[in-house]
Image (spheres, grey):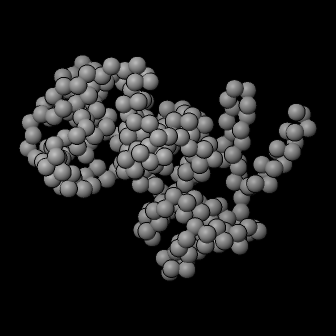
Amino acid sequence: MSSKSKRLGSLADIFQSESLDGTIRKIKLIKIKPSERQPRQDRLKSITELSESIKEEGLLQPIVVNKIENEDAYKIIAGERRFHAVSKLGWLEVECKILNKSDKEIFKLAVIENLQRENLSAFDEVESLKILKKEYSYSDQDLATIFGKSRNYVSEILSISQLSIGKIKECKDAGIENKNLLIQAFQADKKGSFKEFIEKYKSGNLKTVKEAKNFNKTKMNSPNQPNRILSIEKKNNKITIFSTNQEILSSIEDFAKKFE
């Protein structure tokens, strides 16, 4: 098992820790609905290959579903690709594990399941964490704890979401999919050099994270660089400030030490 899987744990472990006693039974496919909110946007990726595998080896893991209130139907929490694969095979029913979860828990578990399988692209991960933070009120520290990451990692990933939709599209069109490169693209945007960053990447003059960091260092003193505080969080009477400028953070830390 990879260290990543150990940190996150399996869905079964999560269910057990929350004292869930989900029953497993076969459900007709016509009663199962894909979730309207799915962390992974490319829902049908490699479905043919998965169908062939299931045809050969059988379904090794049940689909996890949530009972829809006041309906004789179920919503998928985890296993949408498996659902599409068995549908492609013409199955009429499939083995499912049934849970009773809130929308908040459903989305959180769907993100965990996809991260365990490394099925989320950088863009999917950014959007998923953004939803958990903005709509379900998880703090950066909450997300770090849930996904076994550092708070700094979560904050950096979320910083990518501050790029405009147009600039996110430019990154995709340029073929920038690496998380660390996307973080550096955001850093370049802060310094007013996003267009130059993209052009250098497209021309092959900026391909590695090291090269991207060096590029941004040369823009350190750019007059276009804003000094921006990204967020301020208060938890357990402790205030944490996230800023785009290390000098701001250092100054605040020095000031705070005087009152310790």
Q: Position of residue 74 (x, y in %)?
A: 23, 28
What residue is drawn where x is 69% and y is 26%?
Answer: 236
Q: Position of residue 225 (x, y in %)?
A: 71, 63
Quadrant holding the N terminus: top left
Classify residue 163 by image quadrant: bottom right
Q: Is residue 39 left or right of residue 207?
A: left
What residue is drawn where x is 77% and y is 48%?
Answer: 249
The front one of 182 and 135 is 182
What residue is drawn where x is 47% and y is 46%?
Answer: 4
Q: Residue furthest right?
A: 258
Quadrant holding the C terminus: top right
Q: Position of residue 42 (x, y in %)?
A: 31, 53
Q: Residue furthest front?
A: 1
Q: Is residue 101 left or right of residue 206?
A: left
Classify residue 240 by image quadrant: top right
**258 above or below 74?**
below
What residue is drawn where x is 64% and y is 67%?
Answer: 213
Q: Is residue 112 left or right of residue 93?
A: right
**55 above or below 234?**
below
**70 above or below 7?**
above
The answer to whether one can see residue 121 in this image is yes
> Total label count?
0
Q: Position of residue 182 (x, y in %)?
A: 53, 61
The answer to whether one can see residue 199 in this image is no
